[in-house]
Image (cartoon, rainbow, N blue to C red):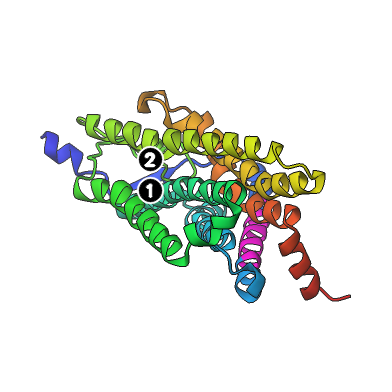
Amino acid sequence: MENSNQTQVTEFILDGLSRDRRTQLFLFVLFLLMYVITVFGNTALIGTVIASPKMHTPMYYFLCHLSFLDLFYSLSIIPKMLLDMVSVEGGRISLIGCMIQMCTCLFLGQTECILLAVMAYDRYIAICFPLRYTVIMSWKLCKNITVIVWLGSFLQTSLPIISQPPNFCHEKHINHFVCEILAVLKLACGNIHLFEKMIFFGSLFTLLVPFVFISGTYICIILSVLKIQSVDGRNKAFSTCASHLTVVCMFYGTSMTMYLGPIKNASEKHKYVTIIYGTITPMLNPLIYSLRNNEVKKYLKKLLPE
């Protein structure tokens, strides 16, 4: 009888952000605008880096990967959310579709966490060891790091769920606008202790450890920059790191408030936190890097008509 109950759920219903039609219309226009800005901003940034030979450096190489992550993270969330807002049937999603979306979001989110730490290390080497930068951050090392980050994130996030998916009973309503793992696992029946441990230790590895590492690298960077005699030199060094530090604070700040805690404490406010790191941050990242990066601004001015 228990096994029969556990196999009855074949689809879920995403409750979304609001059930009021006027509110949904307003949110549809708002998120559609955000999605257009996200796609255009990240695509333009990737195209700018590829087209400008001066930007073929490790820093911009990792920045391209960050924009690629933001682009597909938004793609995995916003189009489905927009469709649900105008759909007569509401936010229906199949069990398989929900698992795919959940794994995709976990995979891309964890990859971005580790990539931000790699970018901090790149800035640390560039500022603290400028004469050895090209030797240490060789293209071979950068490409190897990229493969390890992408492949390692996939193996840690997706394989455990694919190999042992959770069982679900009668409840079908997910109090969220996306199949976010904390909201989904609240509906799981049976023992989810394994998934709780996976999320906890995974969060320690992908959130807390990289954040501590990034904090340590920036302490070293600040101490090194303060030794620079030239005011222009200090300002240039700080400007190089300001964009990355802004993105780190936005992404890690919101993510740690959600995932460094037990699943049972997941509440409705988490879906509003998801908006910040899942939709707003991918939109702002290319704007932050473009507005604060002189190389990007110079190249974009060349593309724009007089």
In the foreground, 246 or 36: 246
Q: Please, what is the dominant secondary structure of the magenta stretch?
A: helix
Q: Which quadrant holds residue 12?
A: top left
Residue at the spot of label 1: 102
Where is residue 263 drawn, in percent x and y?
Answer: 36, 28
Distance (Cα) linking label 1 and label 2: 6 Å
Where is residue 113 drawn, in percent x and y?
Answer: 47, 45
Q: Which quadrant holds residue 259?
A: top left
Above or below, comparing residue 189 to residue 147 in the picture: above
The N terminus, quarter of image: top left
User: In the visual, does 7 lie left or right of 183?
Assistant: left
Q: Which mark is residue 181?
A: 2
Secondary structure beneath disc 2? helix
Above or below, comparing residue 200 to residue 100 in the picture: above
Query: Which residue shows up at 62% across the image and 48% down it?
Result: 127
Disc 1 marks which amino acid?
Met
Where is residue 71 drawn, in percent x and y?
Answer: 54, 60
Secondary structure beneath disc 1? helix
Magenta range is 30-45
Disc 2 marks which amino acid?
Ile
User: In the visual, does 89 lie left or right of 195?
Assistant: right
User: In the visual, does 144 lie left or right of 267?
Assistant: left
In the foreground, 10 or 137: 137
Above or below, comparing residue 156 to residue 171 in the picture: below
Q: Are marks 1 and 2 in contact (CB under 8 Å)?
A: yes
Residue found at the very far left of the displayed protein: 1
Q: Between disc 1 and disc 2, whose residue precedes? A: 1
